[in-house]
Image (cartoon, helix red, strand yellow):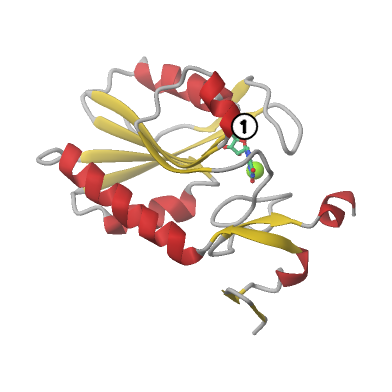
């Protein structure tokens, strides 16, 4: 098994430029977020809505860390745009399997960049009559603060670089890395 400086790298080692957030930092933050959210939602049942595919690893670790009964739903959206930036035009690829009316919905996002995708998603979910609707994102980029999207829980604010790992992909690769990293420039040109 290939092992990089931060443990198993799934063979991606040569593509990694630098690690932004280690597995330990990510898991530590999830423990923190889960503790806060357990207090805020005490006595309530939470419906977690994960945004596919990026939020799958986050959802999996977060649901286990949160000491509350939760249910899980997934939604897949595609924002028209290039591989590394979004346009705000969103299409539903997979909708929720259930009605969320009257539910306490917590949307789990991997990353908010321009905020356009999330802004659209909140409008869409908000129109379905949830009892409450909040967002928990693992990562947020600086551009996101320019758009008025109310995000109650934020894991890390990160620089404006394209990142992969822990659910995030480039051309569908690197999602399985346990940490978050940047890629060497040559990976994008090949
Ligand atoms: P907006 O700009 O609408 O876009 O907030 C959010 C979506 O864009 C993708 N995204 C990234 N994906 N590394 C990725 O792998 C990144 O650094 C990155 N920045 C934005 C992602 O799909 C996210 O949901
Ligand atoms: Mg992607």
Q: Which of 67 and 97 is in front in this view?
A: 67
Q: Is mark 1 within 8 Å of ligand 1?
A: no
Residue 39 relative to residue 27: left or right:
left
| Residue at 76 percent of width and 64 percent of height | 15
Q: Is residue 32 visible?
A: yes
Please identify the quadrant where the N terminus is shown.
bottom right
Outermost residue toward the bottom in this view: 1
Disc 1 crowd, CA 10 A, few/some/many (<14, 14-19, 20+): some
What residue does disc 1 label? 78
**Residue 113: x and y, percent?**
59, 32
| Residue at 45 percent of width and 60 percent of height | 25
Residue 6 relative to residue 122: left or right:
right
| Helix, strand or loop for disc 1 | strand
Residue 79 relative to residue 36: left or right:
right
Please identify the quadrant where the C terminus is shown.
bottom right
Q: Can residue 113 be seen in this view?
A: no
**Residue 173: x and y, percent?**
69, 57
**Residue 90: x and y, percent?**
60, 23
| Residue at 18 percent of width and 49 percent of height | 68
Q: In this view, does 55 lie above or below 90?
A: below
Outermost residue toward the right in this view: 190
| Residue at 47 percent of width and 17 percent of height | 148
Q: In this view, does 13 lie above or below 56?
A: below
**Residue 122: x and y, percent?**
42, 22
The image quadrant where one finds ligand 2 is: top right
Residue 117 relative to residue 38: left or right:
right
Q: In which quarter of the image is residue 162?
A: top right
């Amino acid at each position: 098994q290939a092992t990089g400086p931060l443990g198993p790298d799934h063979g991606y080692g040569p593509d990694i430029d630098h690690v932004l957030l280690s597995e330990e930092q990510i898991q530590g933050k999830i423990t923190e977020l889960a503790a806060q959210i357990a207090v805020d939602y005490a006595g309530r049942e939470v419906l977690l809505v994960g945004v596919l595919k990026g939020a799958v690893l986050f959802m999996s670790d977060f649901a286990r860390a949160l000491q509350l009964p939760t249910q899980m739903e997934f939604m897949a959206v595609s924002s028209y745009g290039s591989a590394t930036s979004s346009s705000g035009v969103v299409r539903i690829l997979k909708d929720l399997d259930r009605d969320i009316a009257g539910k306490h919905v917590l949307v789990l996002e991997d990353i908010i960049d321009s905020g356009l995708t999330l802004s659209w998603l909140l409008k869409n979910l908000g129109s379905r009559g949830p009892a409450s609707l909040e967002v928990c994102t693992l990562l947020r980029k600086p551009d996101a603060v320019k758009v008025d999207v109310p995000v109650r829980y934020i894991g890390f604010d990160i620089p404006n670089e394209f990142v992969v790992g822990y659910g995030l992909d480039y051309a569908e690769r690197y999602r399985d890395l346990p940490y978050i990293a940047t890629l060497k420039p040559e990976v994008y040109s090949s």
